[in-house]
Amino acid sequence: MEVGDKLQEIKDEWCIIGSSALILSDVSNEETFDIDILTTKVGSDNFQRSLKEYIEVTPKTKEDHLFRSDFARFNFPLMDIEIMGGLQVKKDGIWQDVIIEHFREIAIGNMSVKVPTLEEQKRLFLLFGREKDLKRVSLCEQNISKKL
């Protein structure tokens, strides 16, 4: 069974975020070395069970002071996938849930994936607030204004 088939079997809500979402939205042609997927804690558990043969044991995470989640990384030949179940970001000393409110579905081969709208991606990048995220805000803004 292909990885795409296994991803489609996971019934919990999940959405591609980060640089992969920008690429899938035709906003950026930057390189990415992984695909970031936001889901629930239950969704993360289901990903881990379904893709257990690819899971990285005790993956190292960066920026634990800024983000926390039920995190897992999967190593695939072409690109890694990182799963963040119940992702929270720390703002002004308070942990806030990261929730996707607006998304669209994109067909990739024989599967469909959810990607936040450009406005939603902009909101997420502002929430995350890192330097690389703030650079991506302007990419979103430029492309939002093109569509108006």
Image (tube, rainbow, N blue to C red):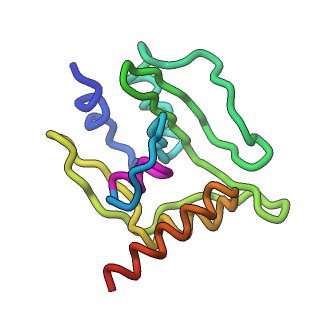
Q: Please identify the quarter of the rendering in which residue 105 is found.
A: bottom left
Q: Please identify the quarter of the rendering in which residue 43 is found.
A: top left
**Residue depicted at 49% across the width and 39% down the height:** 42
Q: Is residue 119 above or below residue 55?
A: below
The residue at the far left in this view is 110
**Residue depicted at 45% across the width and 42% down the height:** 31
Q: Is residue 37 left or right of residue 129?
A: left
Q: Is residue 47 above or below residue 106?
A: above
Where residue 34 sits: x, y (%)?
47, 35
Q: Is residue 22 above or below residue 71?
A: below
**Residue depicted at 40% across the width and 48% down the height:** 14
Secondary structure character of the magenta stretch overall: helix
Task: Work out which quarter of the rendered image holds the C terminus and state it.
Answer: bottom left
Task: Work out which quarter of the rendered image holds the N terminus and state it.
Answer: top left
Instruction: Judge whether residue 56 is colored magenta.
Output: no
Q: Is residue 132 left or right of residue 73?
A: right
Where residue 39 sits: x, y (%)?
48, 46
**Residue depicted at 85% across the width and 60% down the height:** 93
**What span is colored magenta in the figure?**
16-24
- Count the numbered circles shown: 0
Which of the pair 2/76 is nearer the observer? 76
Q: Is residue 140 above or below residue 60?
A: below
Where residue 59 sits: x, y (%)?
63, 23
